Image (tube, grey):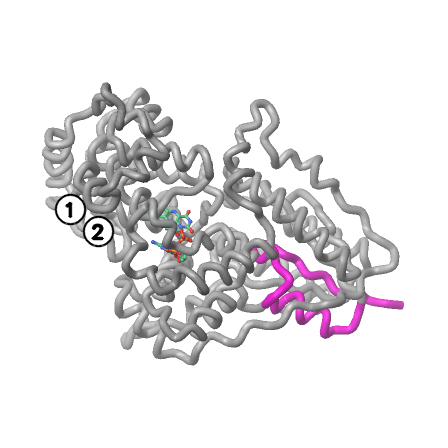
Amino acid sequence: MSSPSIVWLRDDLRLADNPALRAAIDRDEPVIVLYVLDEESPGIRPLGGAARWWLHHSLTSLGERLAERGARLVLRRGPADRVVKETVTDAAAGAVFWNRRYGGPEREVDAALKAALREDGVEVSSFAGSVLFEPWTVKTGAGTHFSVFTPFWRACLGLPAPRAPLPEPREIAGVRHPIPSDELADWGLLPTDPDWAGGLREAWEPGEPAGRRRLREFLAHDLDGYGRARDEPSAGATSLLSPRLRWGEVSPFTVWHEAVEQGRGARFLSELGWREFAWHTLFHSPDLATTNLRREFDAFPWPRLNPAQLDAWQRGRTGVALVDAGMHELWETGYMHNRVRMVAASFLVKNLLVDWRRGEQWFWDTLVDADAANNPFNWQWVAGSGADAAPYFRIFNPDLQAKKFDADGHYVRRWAPEHLSDEPPEPIVDLGETRKAALAAYDVVKRAPRG
Ligand code: FAD
């Protein structure tokens, strides 16, 4: 009688450098690879539309690659604690392996499941696969966690280097009698009516092989110019690895080691550091997407929402060129360049005085890299309420940002050409006036007790 091993994949949709998969293979029993679409466990945030699109295609690619190696991807839907237990029973599995998650509700699910399965005599092991440094390993001299990036990253770099990535398995012994699985198509992850994903299909090829290719191309051709050109949205100078890292198609350990091998990747690696910092911040503040990290921002006097202005921002009809271009890029491709994300977010929060949580939710719905840590962390950074945040009073002027980072107008020409016509759209607000209003609102925060 065999006692199969279950690998429960979550945000780690890859075969290479997957410690949970490796442990299951090393156990020398048939392997079942399980993915659970969990939209029911308390507190788990439902995926946005662009994320669902990516997930569908990434799972398709993963299923094919597993089949080529002898294993099958089992898909099930429902609250993870119930579904994983049912799968263990159906398969008469003897062990379950997974790579750890760091969000609050996810940790609760995983901890309870680990305890329950062990009580039933099932072996359970979890591994570090999604961050280079686990949150409890990075501490200040006083034993607390960091709230400023530079000392945080210095402390990380002082720790033992991240482990070497694990090789991709060539063969995986699957179970003889396949256990029931949902059909991916029945999950309805793809948009149908209307099908808005045409631009996403053009821009991206989800899945591990395309992710690994992109990493190699970036390191071979773009790493040298990264520091110089990363802020220019039309330069194509950044890695475009964010959805790969979000879905775990490429492991941060692989990115780290391959970049270090180049011997000149420190600037790029520090961006991975920001990703680590965001995840550590989420670990220590699980309600990062809903609650100001700096609680004095709770006193911010957000005016009543003007739905027409929010709509104009979402649709890229603000009349401000760089903001409109960014919002069009986002809608079309599920991605926006980092510099433009900062400018578009700042415009919403500071010129339109819309609560950062509304912008965060829109990005959550429309980004293919929508990330439970990076997204709220960066929104709070822009709003001034976050960890090591941009000071509130430093308000981006989107026109000056465009002059500086899109001097030849390539980016605006590509994504919002109407701004370069003879009759460009008028801005929906006056940048100078709204800047003054934002600073006046911020005065209230300055007077509030520090949180
Ligand atoms: P590169 O410049 O090549 O960077 C390499 C990797 O480092 C990225 O793939 C990403 O994983 C990480 N990284 C880079 N910048 C940051 C950062 N500021 N914070 C955290 N990690 C970073 N990034 C997401 O992955 N998901 C999000 O949901 C997300 N939302 C954002 C919202 C706002 C308002 C802002 C200002 C930024 C947001 N970012 C988010 C961070 C950043 O914009 C993207 O990671 C970056 O643009 C992705 O492009 P790239 O992979 O080419 O980046």
* Image position, residue 318 (x, y; %): 27, 26
Q: Residues within 10 Å of mark 1 (few under 14, many from 20)?
A: few
- In the image, which residues are magenta? 1-29
Question: Is any part of residue 108 visible from this angle?
Answer: no
Q: Decide whether residue 6 is among the magenta residues.
A: yes
Q: Is residue 361 left or right of residue 70?
A: left
Q: Is residue 174 above or below residue 408?
A: below
* Image position, residue 304 (x, y; %): 25, 25
- Give the number of marks: 2
Q: Which mark is residue 220?
A: none
Question: Is any part of residue 334 visible from this angle?
Answer: yes
Please tell me which residue is depicted at 49% across the width and 56% down the height of the picture: 245
Residues at marks 2 and 1 touching, judged by CB atoms closer than 8 Å = yes
What element does badge 2 sit on? loop
Mark 2 CB lies closer than 8 A to ligand 1? no
Q: Is residue 293 above or below residue 257?
A: above
Please tell me which residue is depicted at 53% across the width and 38% down the height of the picture: 202
Give the residue at the far right of this rendering: 1
Please tell me which residue is depicted at 29% across the width and 40% down the height of the picture: 345
Please tell me which residue is depicted at 30% across the width and 73% down the height of the picture: 154
Q: Which residue is mark 2?
A: 390
* Image position, residue 110 (x, y; %): 58, 58
Type of the residue with mark 2: Ala
Q: Which residue is mark 1?
A: 394
Q: Nearer the viewer, residue 82 or 382?
A: 382
Type of the residue with mark 1: Arg
**Quadrant of the snapshot with the N terminus:** bottom right
* Image position, residue 322 (x, y; %): 27, 36
Q: Is residue 385 above or below residue 328?
A: below
Label 2 – label 1 distance at C-alpha: 7 Å
